[in-house]
Image (cartoon, helix red, strand yellow):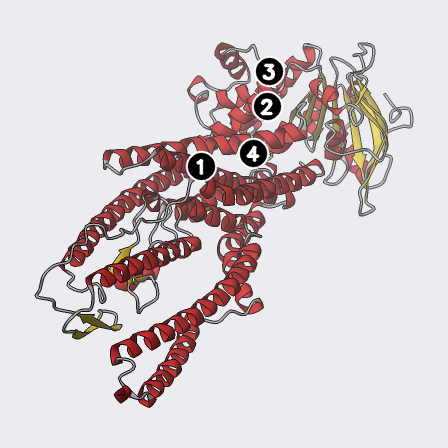
Amino acid sequence: MNTPLNTKQPPLEAIGLTKRYEDGVLALDNVSFAIEAGQLFAILGGNGAGKTTTINLFLNLLEPTQGEARVCGIPSHKQPLLAKEKVAFVSENVTLYPNFTALQNLDFFARLGNKTDYTADDYHRVLDRVGLEREFHRGKLRDFSKGMRQKCGIAIAILKDAPAILLDEPTAGLDPKAGRDFMKLLEELRSEGKAILMSTHDIFRAREVADVVAIMDKGRMIMQTKAADLAGRDLEAIYMQYMAGHNGDASPSETSYV
Amino acid sequence: MLGILITKELRAIIQSPKFVGSFAICSILILLSVYTGVREYKAAVSQYETATSLVSQELCEATSWAMMDTKSYREPDPMQIFVSGLSNDLGRWSSISSDKGVKLRHSVYSDDPIFAVFRFVDFAFIVMFVLSLIAIQFTYDAVNGERESGTLKLVFANAVPRARYLIAKCIGSWLGLAIPLGIPILLSLLLVIVMGVPLTSDHWIKIVMLIALSLLLFTFFIILGVFVSTVTRRSSVSFLTALLIWVLFVMIIPRAGVMAAGGLVDAPRVAEIESRRDAFAAEKWATMFEEMSSLDWDSGKVTADQQWDSIETAVRQEVDQYEARLLEDLRQKKINQQQVAWGLSRLSPASAYQLAAMTLAETDTEAKRRNEDAMATYRNQFNEYANAKQAEAGDTPGIMISVMMDSDGTSSLKVDADRDNAGLDVSDVPRFSPPHIGLAEAIAPMILDFGLIGFYILLAFSGAFVAFVRYDVR
């Protein structure tokens, strides 16, 4: 039985999300947060902090040990297909199908996301929007640079037109210009009302575009604060202090659930 | 959704660089094998026709009913173009005479052993060895390859049911590989028609069934590749695993099954049977000569000819009966051995395919029995005819004895009566009719193999399904 979409529910919500792997490793420990429409939520953290695990739980690529990852109010582990219809995903290393052209990749993933009425013009438009030059629209992905593939990845997410977008370290390995262009796109998507969850190592970009910044370490969300509250403060120093096990300048009120 | 996934699989296969190479190799191999098969078949038909007309001529030139003998030839069948099976291993002819049993001799391979070294590449061989390998080559990384490249995670970030994805993988791969292979197959059939091979409706039905059987085996290897890709995480591991399973199914199990049956079921060799028969015959003939020498020839009660005829006939009958018992015993043991061998070999779908294809083409182990049985029946008819004719014509005057040596070193004794060199009227001599089994009879034994391959497909798909439902797509 499908759960009706609750428009009052935040597009992305983690409630006491916990994941313990079969080998006993606690990857995620009672993590809770909510991302409203038109909000960009950045999760910072080192390798193994639990950022990707959080995203995988929203995509139901993992089953939670406890708690729920909800997409538009739909628990992803209970109704995965319905939940996945409401979320788009861009991975760290977008490879797509190397023998397909950019247009063919877009067409396949758009159709997979139940968007069957797009035309070639629509695909060209969205590729233009993400900044992929026309001459590459019919180029095969195997000949693309990482930045170009990343543009295709975000184009696929745009075409899906889902209320929520999950980004797993999307700017890793991109050159500064490509990274800046990517962030501009995210700002546009946010202004369109998308709820965006982005995991990243890039403190500066997070501070630049995020509405809420969270820091994760060893499966726990150790800080969560509005970006506006970080005005005039050194996020890098805060991050390093948290990672070193100190609370630093962040007060309990700042780390509370947003 | 299924259509989208299948289309993507089709596109992925067709746009893959290895597709062009594989398609070209298969097309060339299939067309070449059929072309060579047609030429071999035509050569065999020509040889058969020459030999049978020579036999007719020899019969016309015979001068004694008592000593008349002939040869029966195994008729070539157009199906051997596609499945040569044992047709090149079985002898082409057997002598038909009162003093020698039926035995097929002079096979293609015994005459030209060079061909036996690597054997012929026919359609069945290509399906079993080449197409199966190509099927695995395209599917061994169907799932884990997408996981490694990250596309699997991207696909399952969408509302895609796993079962549907797996079915699409199988169907898409099948369509992507089977449809292009249909082109050289159709071209090869066209080649058969153009080259003037006489095909009856039964042959066409058999060809269609052979293609269906080949596609079934092809399907198995496609799904096997998908299965292996769902139980391994890395494509390098799945490649080696799939290759190992392929070697087991195509090369090891078929041979191991036969070898194991040879050890499990004891059956004497034909040479052993022949030596026992010869020993028995020698003993009987020795006894006969003793009896002959002890007869009182001077009493005038019986003539030497009468004595010779009655005793010789009795000895021959006794030796024939003894040989028949030995052969029957051997046949039973061979049947048991073969049943065990085929039973074990059928653990491999490739063996099931080969056995079914050979049965369909009538180039299986039964072909030898079928032909020898038909020739034995003909031998009886022929001998009865000659005996009846001899009785009508009365005794023959002078006898000519000639010792002949065949090219394979087999010596034979020919006894002929030169009765004024006049030919006999052999217009009503029985002619050998090569054995033909009906379509239903040819298809019936295949049903088991069809079912078995179908079962293996289900098994592989079930395994892939169970593994993929639990597969970590990250």
Q: Secondary structure at mark 2?
A: helix
Tell me whether marks 1 and 3 sit on the same chain. no
Badge 1 crowding class, 10 Å Cα cut-off, few under 14, some 14 to 19, many 20 or more, is some
Q: CA distance from mark 3 to mark 4?
A: 28 Å
Numbered circle sitting on residue B170: 4
- Mark 2 to mark 3: distance in Å? 20 Å
Query: Residue B205: image x %, image y %?
Result: 41, 34
CB contact under 8 Å: marks 3 and 4: no
Q: Say whether mark 2 and mark 1 are on the same chain.
A: yes
Q: Residues within 10 Å of mark 3 (few under 14, many from 20)?
A: many
Q: What residue sits right under mark 1 in the picture?
A: B209
Identify the subunit bearing mark 3: A
What is the quadrant of residue B324 in the picture?
Answer: bottom left
Q: Which mark is residue B2?
A: 2
Task: Look at 35% across and 81% down and name the residue there.
Answer: B285
Q: Is residue B6 left or right of residue B30?
A: right
Type of amino acid under label 1: Met
Q: Secondary structure at mark 1?
A: helix
- Asked whether residue B112 appears in the rendered view, the answer is no
Q: Please determine whether, in this image, residue B376 is positioned above or below residue B474.
A: below
- Mark 4 is surrounded, within 10 Å at the Cα level, by few (under 14), some (14 to 19) or many (20 or more) other residues, namely many
